[in-house]
């Protein structure tokens, strides 16, 4: 039997366990490592810039560089958006530079491509996105655009987004600043025309899906519910004409706080357009703040209160039954998506009265997400953060297995019957799991979303004894333990249980989830 002194304790696996404010201070003071490891890769600046540009309708994204850059963006964004939303495919093109152009320069190829794109597709805007290759050789893209602008009908807008020139967040910010160049300054006439209109800013996914009620559609419904209207969702399938008029709207309402703040503050500085922002509106408290902030600039405070009363009344009966059953429970929130994790933690603590622990919140996020962290701390919320050694493991794919083992050790000090895990379906700690990305009948925002999440938590805890499908286990997961979607269970049970609830396996009925 091993000596108790040599047996690793939970503390041996913990890098940081404490409030977010403390982690934030350590990161800013350089007292905790914030560099991303090889196993924590992010998209490059080129990819994130291209993602936003793909959400502007009737435009062509012309990637200046080798063809592979265009292929990746096309597959990841344009084709996916078109399939999901039944919208027309708008090509992502490339100047297709070869080795000789990388050596001698590719400006001649760029000139020919711009002229060909304008003649063939007649877009409103041609975005010329620089790749790593053209950024390194120093092609003068701005000079080419200026030279050709009078010879084409489309607006040419260079986007200097070579991937090596900044981390992935900078691509979002860059494009949101650059597209303000397509906007017109407000006039008394344009402001009167859009006095009851709102822009939702910070969108990055392109066209909305047609077959489900997405989160953005829920925010549109809420705005319309207090007698206002949406002018544009930027950049979620918006048009050049919408962008031109966007500064004249009554208010910009941020979708994602970090990205919405980037373009919202740029428009506020350039045009004086007011900005309303909160964290992602998961839950009642954040949604109310979002609605009231919009109403203040629309002059619709009374209508907003009526909307809030109606929305709460629609869920009140079920909400008041479920909420007391969640109070005091613990939620482990996967911290890979920092903005989402912070927003979920806000909802769990403020609306459900739960203890939220954000797990695997990489210290890098404390630097990259300053806007959201500052906002959250200003509201008086200081969520608990747990970072284990596996989170900082360098370049090892098995670090995911390590972090889950470390989490299980940590959970030994918690009541397993009172704990639920918010994370992806491929995670499988031996506690009930809720995967918000698996919610098929969205939305997740707003009052309806809050009730949906509450029901999922309640069901995860109630049905924790249910085994998962043996067939799905063999097909999807390794032979060791795992979790599976409710869709793998019997038809009757699948209808009764929310679709985002996952269950820990290998337990007899009635046994606690840690046994």
Image (cartoon, rainbow, N blue to C red):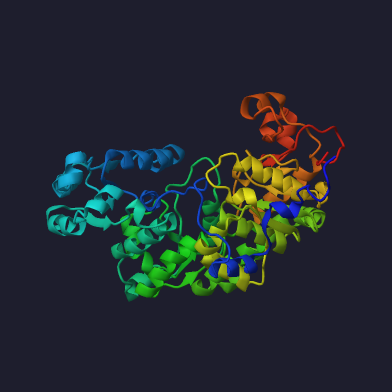
Q: State whether residue 311 appears in this view.
A: no
Q: Residue at x 64, y 68 (%)?
A: 22
Nearest the camera: 327 or 491?
327
Q: State whether residue 241 appears in this view.
A: yes
Q: Residue at x 62, y 48 (%)?
A: 390
Q: Position of residue 369 (x, y in %)?
A: 52, 62
Position of the C terminus, as image quadrant, is top right
Q: Residue 27 falls in which quadrant of the image? A: bottom right
Numbered disc total: 0
**Residue at the outermost right position:** 510
Nearest the camera: 82 or 318?
82
Q: Position of residue 160 (x, y in %)?
A: 29, 57
Q: Residue at x 13, y 47 (%)?
A: 108
Q: Position of residue 98 (x, y in %)?
A: 21, 39
Position of the N terminus, as image quadrant, is top right
Q: Is residue 185 left or right of residue 438?
A: left
Q: Position of residue 247 (x, y in %)?
A: 37, 68
- Residue 83 vs 328, above or below: the answer is above
């Amino acid at each position: 039997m091993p000596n108790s002194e040599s047996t690793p304790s939970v503390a041996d696996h913990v890098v940081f366990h404490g409030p977010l404010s403390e982690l934030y201070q350590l990161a800013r003071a350089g007292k905790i490592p914030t560099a991303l490891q090889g196993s924590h890769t992010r998209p490059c600046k080129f990819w994130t810039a291209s993602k936003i540009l793909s959400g502007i309708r009737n435009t062509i994204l012309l990637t200046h560089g080798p063809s592979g850059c265009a292929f990746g963006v096309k597959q990841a964004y344009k084709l996916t958006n078109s399939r999901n939303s039944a919208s027309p495919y708008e090509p992502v093109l490339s100047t297709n530079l070869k080795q000789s152009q990388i050596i001698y320069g590719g400006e001649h190829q760029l000139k020919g491509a711009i002229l060909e794109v304008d003649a063939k597709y007649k877009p409103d805007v041609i975005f010329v996105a620089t790749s790593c290759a053209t950024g390194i050789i120093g092609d003068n893209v701005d000079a080419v655009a200026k030279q050709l602008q009078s010879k084409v009908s489309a607006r040419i807008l260079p986007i200097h987004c070579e991937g090596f020139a900044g981390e992935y967040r900078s691509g979002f910010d860059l494009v949101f600043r650059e597209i303000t160049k397509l906007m017109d300054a407000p006039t008394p006439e344009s402001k009167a025309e859009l006095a009851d209109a709102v822009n939702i800013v910070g969108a990055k996914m392109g066209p909305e899906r047609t077959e489900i009620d997405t989160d953005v559609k829920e925010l549109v419904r809420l705005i319309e519910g207090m007698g206002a209207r949406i002018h544009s969702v930027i950049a979620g399938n918006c048009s050049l004409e919408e962008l031109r008029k966007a500064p004249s709207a009554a208010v910009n309402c941020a979708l994602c706080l970090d990205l919405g703040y980037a373009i919202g503050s740029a428009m506020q500085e350039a045009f004086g357009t007011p900005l309303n922002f909160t964290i992602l509106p998961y839950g009642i408290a954040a949604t109310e703040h979002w609605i009231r902030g919009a109403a203040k600039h629309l002059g619709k405070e009374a209508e907003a209160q009526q909307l809030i009363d109606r929305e709460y009344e629609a869920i009140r009966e079920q909400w008041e039954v479920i909420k007391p059953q969640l109070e005091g429970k613990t939620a482990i929130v996967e911290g890979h998506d920092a903005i989402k994790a912070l927003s979920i933690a806000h909802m769990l603590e403020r609306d459900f009265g739960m203890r939220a622990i954000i797990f695997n919140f990489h210290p890098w996020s404390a630097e990259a997400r300053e806007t959201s962290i500052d906002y959250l701390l200003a509201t008086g919320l200081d969520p608990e953060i747990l970072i284990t050694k596996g989170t900082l493991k360098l370049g090892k794919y098995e670090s995911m297995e390590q972090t889950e083992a470390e989490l299980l050790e940590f959970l030994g000090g918690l009541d397993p019957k009172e704990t639920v895990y918010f994370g992806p379906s491929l995670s499988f700690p031996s506690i009930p799991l809720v995967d918000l990305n698996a919610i098929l009948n969205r939305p997740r925002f707003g009052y309806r979303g809050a009730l949906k999440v509450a029901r999922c938590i309640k069901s995860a805890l109630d049905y924790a004894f249910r085994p998962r499908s043996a067939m799905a286990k063999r097909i999807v997961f390794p032979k060791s333990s795992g979790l599976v979607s409710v869709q793998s269970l019997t038809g009757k049970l699948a209808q009764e249980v929310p679709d985002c609830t996952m269950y820990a396996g290998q337990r007899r009925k009635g046994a606690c989830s840690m046994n």
